[in-house]
Amino acid sequence: MLTVKEIKYGNESTFKFIVSNTNKIDYEQTIHFKSVIKEYSGYNFMYIYTPSMEVISSVFEFLNFQMRDYAINSRIKALQALKLLYTFEKVIDTDFTKFTAQDVMSFRAFLRVSVKPCTHTNANLYLV
């Protein structure tokens, strides 16, 4: 079974996922994608860092150039959504461009932070 727990630190969320089998923890990992909004020359640049603190360049490009003319609140919402997408991608160890219909259903449950079980491959995904 795969259990995912959200841990809040101020405005940031960290997700801990635990793989267990009959009440024994087989694997545990904490996932945290850090976001930064930095003002430079009158423009708010947005970054998302991987857990190893590398900037995700495609996200930087999208948020700062493709969404350049959007309101700051819209860009912040996109930033937050992308952090959740990349977190879930890491949890299930599948690039989001290769998500199956089941992966999308599990992602929807992840976004709702529900306690309902969702299956992913041979594991159950419980969101608490």
Image (tube, helix red, strand yellow):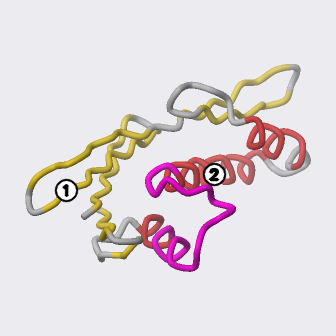
Q: Residue furthest front?
A: 122
The residue under the point 71% across, 49% down is 73
Give amino acid for label 1: Ser
Give amino acid for label 2: Leu
Exactly how many numbered labels are in the figure? 2
- SS class, disc 2: helix
Bounds of the magenta span? 90-107
Q: In which quarter of the image is the C terminus?
A: bottom left
Give 103 or 121, whichever is nearer the viewer.
121
Residue 91 in magenta?
yes
Q: Is residue 82 above or below residue 13?
A: below
Name the residue carrying label 2.
Answer: 82
Give 110 or 29, whichever is nearer the viewer.
29
x and y, in percent, of residue 27 in the image: 25, 45
The residue under the point 48% across, 65% down is 111
Specify the principal SS of the magenta part.
helix
The residue under the point 28% across, 71% down is 115
